[in-house]
Image (spheres, rainbow, N blue to C red):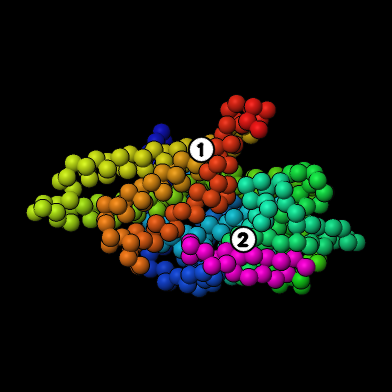
C-alpha cells in the first residue's frame, strides 16, 4: 500500500478474490458447512489465509484484510467459514511441531479439515486468564477435563486449538495451548442456536488425553500463542466489518436513487443525502484504520504499538459497521426487516463482531492500558 491507496498488485488481488468468491454454494446455517469450506479450498481462497511456501509461513495482515473485506461484500457466511479456518489453525502453524503442521495445515487449506479456536468458557470470556479447563500431566501426555463455550465450528470441527490451565491460580501464566483432534475419546459437545447463523457450540472434555506432541509452543505459555493469533486477526475482523458495511451502503445507494417519495427520488431529500454522506465518511475512516493496523503488523510494529493498533481497528470498524448497517436499514424502511432481505441478513450478522475476539469494552481497556499504563486503568 502506497500512502493510503492500494497498489496495482493489491487491486488485482481484490479483483481475483471477488471473481473466485462469486457463485459459491448456498450456505447451510447453524452447523459447519463442509461443502462451502471445500469450495473455498478448491477455489484457492483458503490458501490466501496462509501465504506462500510449503509449509506456508503465514499470510500478510493487509492481504488477509483485503481477502476478508472482499468476500464479506459477497457472502458473509463464506467469509466467516474462511476466517474460522485461519483462526483455528494459525496457532498450529505458528507454534506447532513440524508433524502437526504437516498433518493439519494442508488439510485446512484444501478445505478437507475444519479447524476451531477453543478459548472461551462460561466464566472466561473477556477475562481469558480465568480459564478453568484443566490439563493435567499423565505420563508423557496430558488429560483435559472441563468445558468450553461459545466456540465457533463446535462441535463439528476436525481439529481444535484448545487453551487449558496447566498451573492453578496462575492467571495468564499458567495456560497451555494444545492441538486436539475432534475425534478424541472423551470429547463431545452440542450446537447452540444463535442469532448469527454461523456455527457455534459447547464442548465437553471428559478426560481427553493428548500426547506431548500436541502442545503448541511452550508449556504454561499458551496465552502468548493466543495473543499472537488475535493480534493478527483482530484487524481483519475490522475488515470483515468494513466489507459488510460496504455491502449495506452499496445497496442503500441503489435504493435511495430508485425509491421515489413525493414524486422524486428519496436521495433528493437533504436529510437522506447527508445521512449517506456521513455513513460513507465513517466507512472510509474505518477502512483506513484497519489498513493502517494491518500495514503496521506487516512492517513489524513493536509489542506496544501493534496490540494498540489492532485494538483500535477492531473497535472502531465493528462499532462503525453496526451504525452504518443500522442506518441503511432505517433508510430502506420496512422492506429491510423482511426475512431474506440482504440488509436483514447483514443486520443480524454485524452484531456479533462487537463481541467476539475481544468485546468492544475489552478493546477500549487494551487501548487505555497501552496509552496510560496498566496501573492507572485497573
Instruction: Pick whichever of labels 2 and 1 is earlier in the sequence.
Output: 2
Is any part of residue 99 visible from this angle?
Answer: no
Instruction: Work out whether 302 lies above or below 18.
Output: above
Q: Residue at x 74, y 44 (%)?
A: 172
Q: Is residue 235 magenta?
A: no
Element marked by disc 2: strand
Q: Residue at x 50, y 60 (%)?
A: 80
Q: Residue at x 18, y 56 (%)?
A: 259
Q: Position of residue 303 (x, y in %)?
A: 64, 34
Q: Position of residue 16 (x, y in %)?
A: 40, 57
Q: Residues within 10 Å of mark 1 (few under 14, many from 20)?
A: many
Q: Which residue is mark 1?
A: 312
Is any part of residue 183 visible from this angle?
Answer: yes
Relative to the observer, which residue lies in front, 252 or 121?
121
Magenta part, dominant SS = strand
Q: Which residue is mark 2?
A: 151
Q: Residues within 10 Å of mark 2 (few under 14, many from 20)?
A: many
Image side of residue 239 versus residue 129, left or right: left
Relative to the observer, which residue lies in front, 173 or 26?
173
Q: Position of residue 310 (x, y in %)?
A: 54, 40
The residues colored magenta run: 187-206
> Can you say which quadrant of the picture contains the N terminus?
top left
Q: Position of residue 290 (x, y in %)?
A: 46, 41
Element marked by disc 1: helix
> Can you say which quadrant of the picture contains the C terminus?
top right
Q: Residue furthest right?
A: 139
Amino acid at each position: 500500500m502506497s500512502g493510503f491507496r492500494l497498489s496495482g498488485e493489491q487491486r488485482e488481488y481484490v479483483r481475483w478474490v471477488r471473481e473466485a468468491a462469486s457463485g459459491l454454494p448456498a450456505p447451510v446455517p447453524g452447523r459447519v458447512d463442509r461443502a462451502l469450506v471445500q469450495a473455498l479450498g478448491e477455489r484457492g481462497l483458503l490458501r490466501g489465509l496462509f501465504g506462500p511456501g510449503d509449509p506456508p509461513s503465514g499470510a500478510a495482515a493487509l492481504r488477509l484484510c483485503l481477502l476478508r473485506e472482499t468476500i464479506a461484500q459477497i457472502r458473509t457466511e463464506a467469509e466467516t467459514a474462511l476466517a474460522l479456518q485461519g483462526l483455528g489453525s494459525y496457532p498450529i502453524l505458528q507454534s506447532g511441531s513440524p508433524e502437526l503442521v504437516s498433518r493439519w495445515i494442508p488439510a485446512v487449506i484444501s478445505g478437507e479439515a475444519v479447524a476451531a479456536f477453543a478459548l472461551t468458557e462460561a466464566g472466561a470470556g473477556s477475562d481469558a486468564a480465568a480459564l478453568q479447563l484443566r490439563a493435567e500431566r499423565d505420563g508423557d501426555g496430558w488429560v483435559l477435563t472441563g468445558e468450553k463455550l461459545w466456540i465457533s465450528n463446535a462441535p463439528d470441527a476436525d481439529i481444535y486449538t484448545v487453551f487449558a490451565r496447566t498451573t492453578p491460580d496462575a492467571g495468564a501464566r499458567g495456560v497451555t495451548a494444545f492441538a486436539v483432534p475432534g475425534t478424541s475419546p472423551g470429547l463431545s459437545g452440542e450446537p447452540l442456536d444463535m442469532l448469527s447463523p454461523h456455527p457455534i457450540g459447547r464442548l465437553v472434555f471428559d478426560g481427553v488425553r493428548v500426547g506431548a506432541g500436541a502442545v503448541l509452543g511452550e508449556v504454561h505459555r499458551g496465552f502468548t500463542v493466543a495473543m499472537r493469533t488475535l493480534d493478527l486477526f483482530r484487524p481483519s475482523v475490522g475488515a470483515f466489518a468494513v466489507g459488510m458495511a460496504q455491502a449495506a451502503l452499496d445497496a442503500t445507494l441503489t435504493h435511495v436513487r430508485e425509491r421515489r417519495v413525493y414524486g422524486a427520488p428519496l436521495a433528493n431529500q437533504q436529510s437522506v443525502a447527508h445521512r449517506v454522506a456521513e455513513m460513507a465518511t465513517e466507512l472510509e475512516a474505518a477502512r483506513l484504520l484497519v489498513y493502517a493496523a494491518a500495514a503496521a503488523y506487516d512492517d513489524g510494529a513493536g509489542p506496544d504499538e501493534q496490540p494498540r493498533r489492532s485494538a483500535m481497528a477492531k473497535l472502531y470498524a465493528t462499532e462503525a459497521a453496526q451504525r452504518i448497517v443500522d442506518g441503511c436499514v432505517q433508510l430502506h424502511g420496512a422492506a429491510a426487516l423482511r426475512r431474506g432481505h440482504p440488509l436483514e441478513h447483514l443486520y443480524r450478522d454485524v452484531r456479533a463482531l462487537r463481541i467476539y475476539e475481544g468485546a468492544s469494552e475489552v478493546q477500549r481497556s487494551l487501548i487505555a492500558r497501552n496509552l496510560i499504563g496498566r496501573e492507572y486503568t485497573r
